[in-house]
Amino acid sequence: MKRRFCMGFRLGTLIGACVVMVAWGANGAVVLQDGFNNGTISTPDFSTVGNWSLDSATNASEAGGILTVGTQNSTASTSNNLRINTTSGLNPFTSTVQISVREFDLFGTGSYEPATAGRFRLGLVSENGSFFGANDGFALEINNNGLGARLGTKLNAPSADPNSSAVNLSGLASAITGFDLVVDFDSWELILYSDSGILYEGEGAWSLGTAAEWGTGTANVGNSALLLAVQNAGAVAPLTGFKSFSMGSIEVTTTVIPEPSRAMLLMLAGIGVAFWRKR
Ligand SMILES: [Ca+2]
Ligand SMILES: [Ca+2]
């Protein structure tokens, strides 16, 4: 995301400008940190963007530094959501948002034990509590008991929920146990980890539309949310059991996207540095 500012300049200018941009780009601020240590699901260890709320108090726990959320009953296609109704501190149109999750596990019991049944999703959504609303958002899905993943935006898949427009993986060598996801309004980066190392690394362009289109909460207030969800789906009757996810930690960091005028000033500063060094 920073590289585009460095193209089309001579080497000295490029180095000077990049030094300035990198120094500035490192100023990410942690807005949410949760190791699930205090025993109360609703209260993160640290948050400037709000507290968690749970669709149902049942089938969820925070114990031993691990959050576990399961579906609510054994019928097909039910889901349970843990969410933070976001404030302006979590806005992909003004900030680059990095979300890191560790000690992740997707598993099931009964009819939902097979890999093909049920899924987990994480996203910034424009309608509180849903990946299926009319307004666009994005979702990272982990499916197949951690052996598959999809990433996409609603805008890139207008006829469906946010799904596989950016990433579509299946048959991974081992289960996903963590990820780093970096998003803003026009680009994404994703690294998936297993216990033995990096499973996948990629980046690309996408679109979340415009801030005005992004949900009833324009500029990321109102109904928008950071959502963690697990869904019962795809099981063979008779239906028993639940799909669940667990995680040991989540951290959300935001870095303000430069205003065009501000980026130009920084580049001029970089050119100045390069010129001064040349003399
Ligand atoms: Ca807690
Ligand atoms: Ca933990």
Image: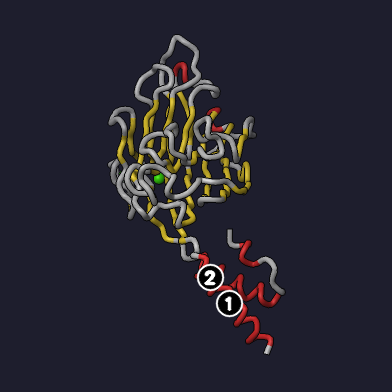
Q: Residues within 10 Å of mark 2 (few under 14, many from 20)?
A: few
Check the image and name the residue furthest to the right. Answer: 10
Real-space CA distance between mark 1 and mark 2, rounded to the nearest whole angstrom: 15 Å
Residue 78 in view (yes/no): yes
Task: Please report the residue visible at 63 percent of the width from the left and 62 percent of the height from the top.
Answer: 3
Q: Is residue 111 above or below residue 134?
A: above
Query: Where is residue 105 drawn, in percent x and y?
Result: 48, 35
Label 1 is placed on what type of residue? Leu
| Residue 268: numbered disc | 1
Check the image and name the residue furthest to the top. Answer: 238
Task: Please report the residue visible at 50 percent of the width from the left and 38 percent of the height from the top.
Answer: 154
Residue 65 in view (yes/no): no
Quadrant occupied by the N terminus: bottom right
Task: Please report the residue visible at 52 percent of the width from the left and 43 percent of the height from the top.
Answer: 178
Colouring convention used in this rendered image of the protein: secondary structure
Secondary structure state at the residue bearing disc 2: helix
CB under 8 Å between discs 1 and 2: no
| Residue 90: numbered disc | none
Which residue is identified by label 2? 23
